[in-house]
Amino acid sequence: MVERLTWKKLALELAFFYLPWFVIGWFFGGLPWLLLLATVLVLLWNFYHQLKLSDWLWKERSLTPPSGSGSWTPLFNGIYRLQKRNRRRRKELANLIRRFRNGAESLPDAVVVFEHDGSIVWCNKLAQDLLGFRMPDDAGQYIGNLIRTPEFIEYLSRAELGEAFEMRSPLHVSKTLEFRTMPYAEGEYLMVVRDITQLKQLEGMRRNFFANVSHELRTPMTVLRGYLEMAEDPDMLVGPMWDKAHGVMTEQLTRMEGLVEQLLTLSKIEASVKIALDQKVNVPAMLDVLQKEAQALSGDQAHEFEFDVDHSLSVLGDDDQLRSAISNLVYNAVKHTPASAKIAVRWFRTPQGPRLEVKDSGEGIAPQHIDRLTERFYRVDKARSRETGGSGLGLAIVKHALNHHESELEIYSKVGKGSVFSFTLPERLAC
């Protein structure tokens, strides 16, 4: 290990160098000229090592210092140690920055770092997808030039750190974004942008859900309250009037009971985030029972039923959820098909997997309604749904039950011709 250079060592080195020249000049004469020659040699020796140092610092890429002698050896080694320490620190800093960026890329939110004047320092990939930024091209750009909406510019000017700000995505108008800005490094800010579109939709669905449930329960409760108030006077409910009141109250109670049952079924299916598709479901036996129930539900309407069932085709899945999905499709066909009309149910194997089709010859559904049929409480004809006792939850139950079985509801309908509701389960579920 080479020790560091000191004034004492440097003075001794010069003394040992000049001493022979001084002795020779003292005894043989020409002392000034010999000292001048020695000084020139010292300068040339130092100039040579300066050039070696310059070439090492600016031209060579090697970390190893050049060989030196005398006082230059500790200088070369000292610079070498300094460079080595700086390279280690740069490597540690690069690793820290890489870990930070990898962590920011893994976040479910967009992250933007910008300076106090609004110039962008860095952003993650999700910020590029949500906000349209491009890195590193947009580095140094004023963020207000890339997001030009007036409300965002006003938000930046207010500098309300920590407070949430919502606006439509500048790239996707259908998306709603939430912005939060907080201090980051000195003179810099960190902006976190979150896509809250689904959260807003869920809030809207929750509001609509409670509004619809309240509305659906209010009507039968109002009817029951009216008859109960009439029952306070015994003379009001006598003879045929009591029979009518009893029938209406029973009908309204049945309607409420059906609504509550559908709500509980939908809640149970939605709560089952992931189910094990390992239970054997005998769909043919299920359809045999549903055929009898559909005929009983048809009653005096005398629908013509045609059940074409592959009795050798069973599937793996959840029995309760598949029963809810299939029964809702069959019951809907009965409720929305005119009397004496035909209803066809097919359960068969396709190259893609087991498939169920429920075809009716009802009034059909206009195209603008088809995409919304699986929404809760959505009805094409509200008056007719009340007459048939529909709750508006049946197809929502079908949708969620099929999602759990890696399938989706397919709807084909033509006004005046009827509709076909179908789904195909994955082939791997057939057994």
Image: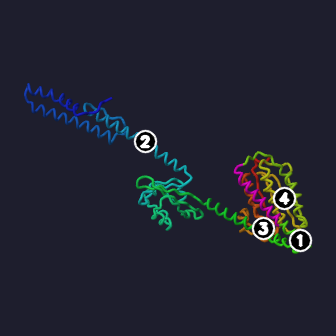
Please state the horizontal and vertical placement of residue 396, each as a whole percent of the image: 74, 60
Q: Residues within 10 Å of mark 1 (few under 14, many from 20)?
A: some
Cα distance in 3D space between marks 2 and 3: 73 Å
Cα distance in 3D space between marks 1 and 3: 18 Å
Disc 4 marks which amino acid? Val
Residue at image coords 13%, 34%: 36
**CB of mark 4 within 8 Å of CB of mark 3?**
no
Cα distance in 3D space between marks 1 and 4: 41 Å
Please state the horizontal and vertical placement of residue 292, each as a whole percent of the image: 89, 58
Looking at the rendered structure, the secondary structure element under dot 3 is helix
Extreme-left residue of the structure: 29
**CB of mark 2 within 8 Å of CB of mark 3?**
no
Q: Which mark is residue 242?
A: 1
Q: Is residue 37 magenta?
A: no
Looking at the rendered structure, the secondary structure element under dot 1 is helix
Please state the horizontal and vertical placement of residue 306, each as a whole percent of the image: 88, 60
Foreground mark, 2 or 4, reads 2
Q: Main secondary structure of the magenta part?
A: helix
Residue range highlighted in magenta: 252-274
According to the picture, the residue beneath numbered tag 2 turns out to be 91
Extreme-right residue of the structure: 239
Foreground mark, 1 or 2, reads 1
Cα distance in 3D space between marks 1 and 2: 90 Å
Marks 2 and 3, the one that precedes in the sequence: 2
Marks 1 and 3, the one that precedes in the sequence: 3
Q: Which mark is residue 221?
A: 3
Q: Which mark is residue 345?
A: 4
Residue at image coords 55%, 60%: 178
Cα distance in 3D space between marks 4 and 3: 37 Å
Marks 1 and 2, the one that precedes in the sequence: 2
